[in-house]
Amino acid sequence: MSQQNEFKRGWAVLLGAFIGTGVGLASMVYYSSGIWIRPWQQEFGWTRAEMAFQTSIAVVVMMLLAPLVGRLIDRYGLRRVTAICLLGYGSFLAVFPFMNGSLMVLYALSFGYAIFGVGTTGIAFTRAVNAFFIKNRGLALGICLTSTGVVAYAMPRFMTPYVAEHGWRAGYWVMFAIVMVCVPIVYLLLRDGPDEDDPASLAQAQKGMRFAEAIRTVTFWKVASIFLLISTAILGLIPAFIPLLQDAGLSPQEAGSLGAILGLSILVSRLFIGFIIDRIFAPYVAAVAFAFVGLGCLALGVGGIDYAVLAAIALGFAVGAEVDLIGYFTARYFGMANYGSIYGLQYSIFIFGAAIGPVYTGYIWDVTGNYDLSLIIAAALMVPVIIIALTLPAFDNE
């Protein structure tokens, strides 16, 4: 099937996956998390490590449930599982404005929305894209996941000054409304797989390893190791980026503008990397991309705020590459027959690092008053990422 025909056949699914990814927990909530740190610190007196523990709770819940949700999607279908998850997670957002300063309430709400939020991540939406796109899989995944770049740009750029003027509670009401509007749109656009009159795509959808077979391969654990290291290094720095800039003396508007550069970097890098990995061996692309990420983190950690733009672009590249490559590697190395289950475990391992990163990043700030050491650690962790990526095997011919 030609490139034109693939996009003609799958544009609606791609649009539905684009919207769903953008409003999901791992996108909209994650890229807005830095906006609430200073307002919550001022109103409730919480430390940054205490607030970071909220993210860790959500991540641990998602880590434990990701393989299960992948199996549910494989068994009961993408549309139903995703719609229920979007509704549940969105409903929890409407409860956040009623918080009164109890950390236990914050943690309970984070636990609740994570139960549903795991079904609003790449587990669901990359599966849809991989099922409909073969020759242009990387580009299609890149297009789908650029929605996180749009959100990562829009949230700091517009929500930061909005919250400064109207308060953090108003910001949560806006997010709740966005999710509720998007639920029926996503449900109508998504499909679980290609039509029966497309035998080539159906054959691809049925091809692949069993779950038990995949997890016994060295390749599975190499891929898992790469993304565990990346998430541990980077995912604590993303929500810390705006407060880092404000700590350096920038205004909310200035910090939001630099945060928006990070979002634009995610958007551009997802399209660029998605386009390139259809043409150049993906592990080589990953090695180069994460070498740049390490340099950007090291520059900000050692050189200071003058390198904030470079760091924003580098962090955007890290986030822009990670979920695209998890989905791409899963489909190329292990096939689509049990994609949800296999991707679910890969994602579970990936977000384990997201449980570690925010806590040690917040702790480092509480002890030192800055994030310099976190940035240097992130740069160091890119070294084993590059080495492992360069040892990945060739893809089987499709």
Image (spheres, rainbow, N blue to C red):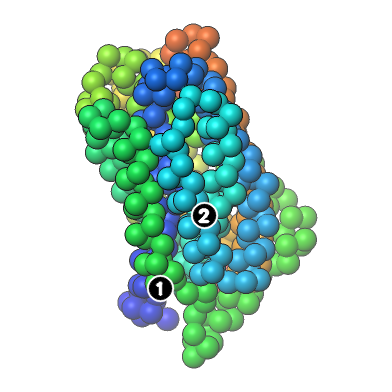
Which residue shows up at 32% across the image and 21% down it? Answer: 245
Q: Residues within 10 Å of mark 2 (few under 14, many from 20)?
A: some
Residue picked out by circle 1: 188
Q: Which is nearer the N-term, disc 1 or disc 2?
A: 2
x, y percent for residue 240: 42, 26
Q: Is residue 17 left or right of residue 325?
A: left
The reply to whether the C-beta atoms of the residues labelled 1 and 2 are less than 8 Å apart is no
Q: Is residue 15 visible?
A: yes
Q: Is residue 291 visible?
A: no
Label 1 residue SS: helix
Residue kind at label 1, given as amino acid type: Leu
Q: Nearer the viewer, residue 390 or 158?
A: 158
Q: Residue furthest top?
A: 368
Residue picked out by circle 2: 88
Label 2 residue SS: helix
x, y percent for residue 269: 36, 47
Q: Nearer the viewer, residue 2 or 205?
A: 205
x, y percent for residue 368: 49, 9
Which residue shows up at 44% across the image and 44% down it? Answer: 93
Check the image and report above or below for 201 versus 380.
below
